Amino acid sequence: MSTHGDANALLAEIESIGVDPERGGYTRPVFSEPELELREWFSRHAAARGLTVETDGNGILWAWWDADGASRRDVIVTGSHLDSVPGGGNFDGPLGVASALAAVDLLRDRGIAPVRPLAVAVFPEEEGSRFGIACLGSRLLAGVVAPEKVRALRDEGGRSYAEVSAGVGADPATIGPDLERLSAISAFVELHVEQGRGLADLDEPVALAGAIIAHGRWHVRIEGRGDHAGATRMADRQDPVVVAAETIRSLRVHTLVVDDARGTVGRIKVTPGGTNVIASAVDLWLDVRHRSEEAVRRIVSEVAAATGRAAEAEGCVATVTEQSFSPTVLFDPSLRERMQGVLPASPVLDTGAGHDAGVLAEIIPTGMLFVRNPTGSSHTPAETAEPDDVAAGVTALADVLEHLLTR
Ligand code: GLV
Ligand code: MN
Ligand code: MN
């Protein structure tokens, strides 16, 4: 099957990579075998298109289409990520990467002559599903997370970022801000599957992004005293699971009273984790989002206070640590105006999902395109996009890139 100009065909090529038979869908954490295979796949396709591929010090792949006689300044960048959440879909990330490759084909077929370079970028650990911090590659690039902190981050198996990245041939010493590279970029446009029902409700295939709502992650650690489930009287327990239950309940309660806030606990680790064992510790992670940063902070502080009270009552000790926080992002209005000029029929939608484009928006003009997802679901195998909409997304991306590369 030819993949020329066809993001559906490109996505079909990777549909067996990282399949997770236990969870369903795909599990493609950064630096895992499937994620490395996907990087190889991308590099192969980029090279086949005559793009020059390099990996920078942060593990970001850049595939260059250099413009005749132009230096690598005033660069237009598109792309997305290839890592996934545990049990995710095949579109969150890969759709933007496949569409970028297909858009390059379309632009070449149109015979356009770029006056400035285009780079297709693939960002590692966008989901933060291995080391806890979302958009890790773009955060490192932008200098908004300290390299020493990143090198010390540990995955579920206790292995550090430094260890894991070195194990796959990357050099952890080279991670960190690259403001020279960023200052050469004049616009970044990320295409992404929509992660809600906005386009399905509007019956439109493609939208432009308006804003990303503020979001953050907090690690809650509750320490108690492990003991025997049968031999320990209820009055003698210091059970961290009971405290965790209160954390989760209070997150729901405090989120519900703020209009359109989102609060999630999607990951809990009970140590040691035996049915007949009172736990000695619980780790859980809060994901809280709202358009107002202040509302997010208020919810988290209420939950932290409720957790502290429950911990005291149970004789446990609880700590709440911020892992990452992303303020509300309003995408660059003048870039969006230009994109709207190219795609006048496309609506503008805000999103509750985080993206590398949101991190880079703090530093360079960025914009996003969303492609309709009929189920409205994401971070689940139910995430999808119709082939015609995928093709419409590629055309929209090519139209926007043509405008940015030639004017
Ligand atoms: C990434 O998709 C996120 O919003 O967490
Ligand atoms: Mn994504
Ligand atoms: Mn995602």
Image (cartoon, rainbow, N blue to C red):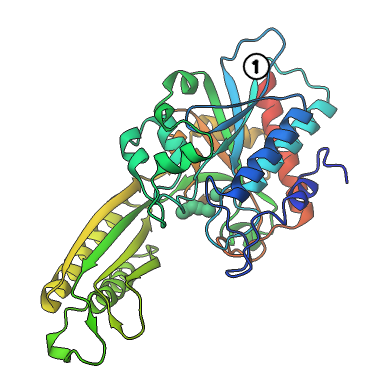
Q: Residue at x 23, y 74 (%)?
A: 240
Instruction: Give residue 149's quadrant in the image.
Output: top left
Number of callouts = 1
Amino acid type, mark 1: Arg
Work out whether 336 lies above or below 53.
below
The residue at the far top in this view is 69
Work out whether 118 lies above or below 284.
above
**Looking at the rendering, in which quadrant would you find the C terminus?**
top right
Q: Position of residue 331 (x, y in %)?
A: 48, 38
Q: Is 127 left or right of 103, judged from the image as shown?
A: left
Q: Is 307 left or right of 219, judged from the image as shown?
A: left
Q: Which residue is mark 1?
A: 116
Q: Residue at x 60, y 47 (%)?
A: 35
Q: Is 361 left or right of 390, judged from the image as shown?
A: left
Q: Residue at x 40, y 49 (%)?
A: 159
Q: Position of residue 89 (x, y in %)?
A: 62, 59
Q: Is the CB–ligand 2 distance for label 1 below 8 Å?
A: no
Q: Residue at x 33, y 47 (%)?
A: 325
Q: Secondary structure at mark 1?
A: loop
User: Which one is nearer the viewer's eye here, 175 or 135?
Assistant: 175
Would you call the spot at circle 1 few (<14 residues within 10 Å), some (14-19), or many (20 or more)?
Answer: many
Q: Position of residue 21 (x, y in %)?
A: 64, 68
